[in-house]
Image (spheres, rainbow, N blue to C red):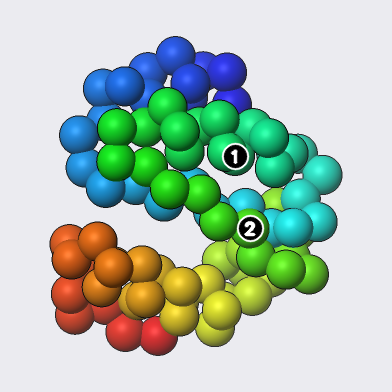
Amino acid sequence: VQDLLACADRVRVPTWVVRGEKDPVVTTEEMQALAEQLPMGRGVSLPSVGHCPQMEAPEATARLVSFLGGDFGWASGVTG
């Protein structure tokens, strides 16, 4: 996470930092810090999921990506 924090201010696109609530690697605080450091960043934790939400909860992740893309307006056409 520290490596990502060091270059986060260079990201110029809307970015979502997604973690699983039960992630043993990335803490909620680290996720929030990264989301806050990104110029257009937001963070979200998926309940009852670990470190790999896209593998552990693919349907929830797809719905989240679809919803978030619509919220930011940059990923229209993504479906879940």
Which residue type does callout 2 highlight?
Ser
Residue 32, quarter of picture: top right
Residue 73: % across, % down: 18, 66
Is 33 left or right of 40, judged from the image as shown?
right
- Please tell me whether residue 50 is drawn above or below residue 27 in the rendered image: below
Give the residue pinned by disc 1.
Answer: 31
- Please tell me whether residue 7 is drawn above or below residue 44 in the rendered image: above
Q: Which mark is residue 7?
A: none
Is label 2 in a helix, a strand or a loop? strand
Gap in angstroms between the C-alphas marked 2 and 1:
8 Å
Q: Which mark is residue 45?
A: 2
Quadrant where the N terminus sits is top right
Residue drawn where x is 50% and y is 32% of the image: 34
Residue 79: % across, % down: 32, 84
Is 37 left or right of 69, judged from the image as shown?
right
Count residues near mark 2 (Cα–Cα under 10 Å), then give few for <14, some for 14-19, many for 20+.
some
Is residue 1 visible in this depiction of the protein? yes
- Sequence order check, earlier mark of 2 and 1: 1
Tag 2 and tag 1, C-beta contact below 8 Å = yes
- Please tell me whether residue 19 is drawn above or below residue 55 in the rendered image: above
